[in-house]
Amino acid sequence: MSLQLQPDVSLKPFNTFGIDVRADWLVQASSQAQIVEALAVAQARQWPVLVIGGGSNLLLAGDIPGLVLRVATRGIRLLDDDGERVVVEAEAGEPWHGFVLHTLGLGLAGLENLSLIPGTVGAAPMQNIGAYGVEIQDLFAGLTALDRHSGETRQFSLQDCRFGYRDSVFKQEPGRWLILRVRFALQRTAHLRLDYGPVRQRLAELGIAEPTASDVSAAICSIRREKLPDPAELGNAGSFFKNPLVDAAQAEALRLDYPGLVAYPQADGRVKLAAGWLIEQAGWKGHRKGDAGVHRLQSLVLVNYGQASGAQIQQLAQAIQADILRRFGVQLEMEPNLYPQQ
Ligand code: FAD
Ligand code: NAP
């Protein structure tokens, strides 16, 4: 199929914040050949290119110059099966949650704690998506990416990806790598992770004593549906700030002032603070200015009540950052990717 370049397109349907900015050009590429062709067209016309998937981790603070390339490739295949460990590969445009359900339906465990995360398979390695104690690096078996500088494809191993907390080489080298397909090593025997947050309790409430991986997925979906706003109803990009990592001495000093401090010691000696708790303590929960707000149930989620601009969401975020720094001496870092880059 030939490439369909659409001029002057509203990106409102293409970002879960629902921010109404425009792209000079939009193309939706459903094959690797179309991706390569779109990049070649952009290079010939000297357009900058923004690659997107589901638009669920973006803050669009203004119109996007050049070409927005939405990766819409589909396909899931089994590559290797030794009877216990199965390697599954998915094309970058596969919707993440559908992919998780597909693997569970095949009797393969591993991705259950990552259920109901919006977005695509191809964006998942960008920030090493994580939830309920599991990150994709725990199941990762390799990926194929296109080097936008040289035009060549390259295979990435786990080490090559330099995964960290909501971080990767792809995030550190913005605009260089276009992820084409990702591989995961899953198990026929489930090794369930139930000790994070309210997972075990929700399974008990559902009357499930010996859960399967699919039961865990269903429990996590039900928790998430209760706690998190559905972007189809209220624009948002999930957690707006990363949980800050501070040194143990700072965490201890904060605990003296705030005995209820929510803090999790990390293997490297640092302490992870719950950013949502800090924001709530500072009184921002449910705050609203115009159409930009802090969600009434989950302080880590900034929301668009309808007509907020990206700049208004950004101003709210900056006000929260300044307040948290002043009160707690903690610098909050934004999690969604900001465009146009500033
Ligand atoms: P986009 O928002 O389209 O893009 C994100 C970034 O990846 C951009 O920089 C973009 O340029 C780049 N990118 C996209 N596709 C590619 C590609 N193929 N190759 C190279 N670069 C690419 N995240 C978590 O980690 N855990 C959660 O539990 C979680 N829960 C969420 C809940 C809600 C309600 C929402 C709205 C978001 C949540 N997120 C969560 C954030 C988001 O869903 C993930 O970061 C997701 O992986 C983003 O996928 P996407 O396809 O929407 O990426
Ligand atoms: P929660 O269960 O209310 O917990 C609050 C915070 O405490 C979380 O951010 C989590 O950190 C941390 N935490 C909880 N239990 C922990 C434990 N046993 N050990 C270490 N840290 C612990 O969080 P929530 O907001 O409802 O989210 C549930 C999960 O989904 C979390 O893992 C969260 O990261 C993920 N999520 C992510 C996004 C996103 O956009 N990135 C959006 C929604 C939910 P971590 O965040 O580091 O896990």
Image: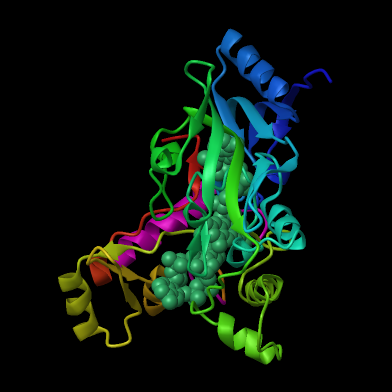
Q: Which residues are magenta?
A: 297-325
Report the front residue among 181 and 295. Answer: 181
Q: In which quadrant is the C terminus drawn?
A: top left
| Percent coordinates x, y for residue 316 in the rendering | 46, 58
Residue at the extreme top of the image, as rendered: 44
Q: Residue at x 77, y 61 (%)?
A: 105
| Percent coordinates x, y for residue 243 in the rendering | 38, 64
The image shows a total of numbered marks equal to: 0
Q: Residue at x 71, y 91 (%)?
A: 207
Image side of residue 136 versus residue 121, left or right: left
Would residue 52 be seen by someone viewing this image from the given angle?
yes
Would residue 290 be seen by someone viewing this image from the given angle?
no
Colour scheme shown: rainbow
Q: Residue at x 67, y 42 (%)?
A: 90
Q: Quadrant of residue 85?
A: bottom right
Q: Quadrant of residue 244?
A: bottom left
Report the front residue among 172 and 213. Answer: 213
Residue 45 vs 78, above or below: the answer is above
| Percent coordinates x, y for residue 284 in the rendering | 44, 72
Q: In which quadrant is the N terminus drawn?
A: top right
Residue 292 vs 153, above or below: the answer is below
Image side of residue 328 versus residue 116, left or right: left
Report the front residue among 231 and 100. Answer: 100
Q: Residue at x 57, y 44 (%)?
A: 123
Q: Is residue 319 magenta?
A: yes
Q: Is residue 312 magenta?
A: yes
